Image (tube, rainbow, N blue to C red):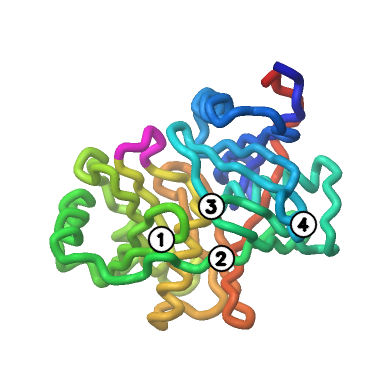
Amino acid sequence: MILRKYSEVDVFSPTPYRGNPLAVVHGADGLSDEEMQRFAKWTNLSETTFLLPPTNPVADYRVRIFTASQELPFAGHPTLGSAFAWLNADGVPKTEGRIVQECGAGLVEVLVQGERLAFAAPPLIRYEPIDESLVQQIAQALGIARENIIDSSWLVNGPQWIGVRLSSAQEVLALNPDPADLESLAVGVVGPHEHGHDANFEVRAFIGGDPVWEDPVTGSLNAGLARWMIDSQIAGQHYIAAQGTAIGYEGRVHIDVEDDIIWVGGNVMSCVNGEVQL
C-alpha cells in the first residue's frame, strides 16, 4: 500500500454540506478492482471515484466509479465531483474551460463555470414507457394510488433509472415509500413547484436494495428526467430542480439545453483534502 492524494467534495448544492458527498482517490494506478470496491464500501458514501491516466488521447483523465456494492459506467455527481477534484489537484485541461472525462460509458464533456460545473448528459440507452404491471408495483411501493402517476418512462444512461411524474412537488415531498417493495428498482420521482419557488421541480431518487436508499442529489437521474420532460414539453430548456429536501439536503441541479445538448450543472465545494493509504 502507498499514500495517495485523497479528496472529499460536496456536489450539487450552493450550501456547504447540503449536497451529495463524493470520495475521490487520486493517482489510483495499480489498484485492483477488488481493492477499489473494498475501499468504496469502507467510505460508506453513495459513490467513490478513482482517478487514472486516460487511455483515450482526447480525454484529460479517466475515472472509475464505485458504489458500496458495484462499479458504475457513469454517474452524475461523481462526474462533476471528480472533475472538480482533478482541477483542484492542479489538473490542466487540454481545452481551457472544458474537461473531457473518460469513464465506462465513454467520453463525457464537463464545462467549468467557476464553482459551478456542468456535464453533457450522455444519451439514454433505454428510453421507453414502463409496462403497466411495473407501474402498479411502483405505485404500491411509493404508497400512492396508481392514478396519481401521470406518466412514467425508462431513463437508462448507465444507472437503470425509471422516471415517475406526479402532479406537484408537494406530492413528491409527501412520499414515504417502503424500500423492500421496490426490490432492486431505481425510481426517480418528479413534480412541479408552484410559481415563486426558487426551483421549478422537486426530485426524489429511491434505490431499492441499496444501503443509501434515498440519494441526496442525483446527476444521472436529473439528466434522464431532463431529456424526458423536455421531449414531453413539461419543462423548458432552462430550469432548476431541487432534490434532497425531504431528507435534510439542499440540492439544486441546473438544466440548460444548447444545440440539443443537455447540460446538467451544479456547485461543487472542497470539504476534505489529505492522503489515504491504499
Q: Secondary structure at mark 4?
A: loop
Q: Which quadrant of the rendered structure holds the N terminus?
A: top right
Residue type at numbered disc 2: Ala
Inter-mark Cα distance, 4 to 2: 21 Å
Mark 1, other Cα within 10 Å: few <14 / some 14–19 / many ≥20? many
Q: Which residues are magenta?
A: 209-213
Q: Decide: is 98 above or below 185.
A: below
Q: Secondary structure at mark 1?
A: strand
> Does residue 13 appear in this view?
no
261 left or right of 153? Answer: right
Residue type at numbered disc 3: Phe
Residue type at numbered disc 1: Val
Instruction: Report the residue marked by disc 4.
Output: 57
Closer to the N terminus: mark 2 or mark 3?
Answer: 3
Instruction: Report the residue marked by disc 3.
Output: 74
Residue type at numbered disc 4: Pro
Q: Decide: is 170 above or below 167.
A: above
In the image, residue 145 lies at what x, y percent? 14, 60
Instruction: Report the residue marked by disc 2.
Output: 121
227 left or right of 33? Answer: left
Q: Which mark is residue 156?
A: 1
Q: Decide: is 266 above or below 20.
A: below
Closer to the N terminus: mark 1 or mark 2?
Answer: 2
Q: Magenta segment, principal secondary structure?
A: loop
**Is residue 42 one of those drawn in magenta?**
no
Inter-mark Cα distance, 4 to 3: 19 Å
Q: Secondary structure at mark 3?
A: loop
Inter-mark Cα distance, 1 to 2: 11 Å
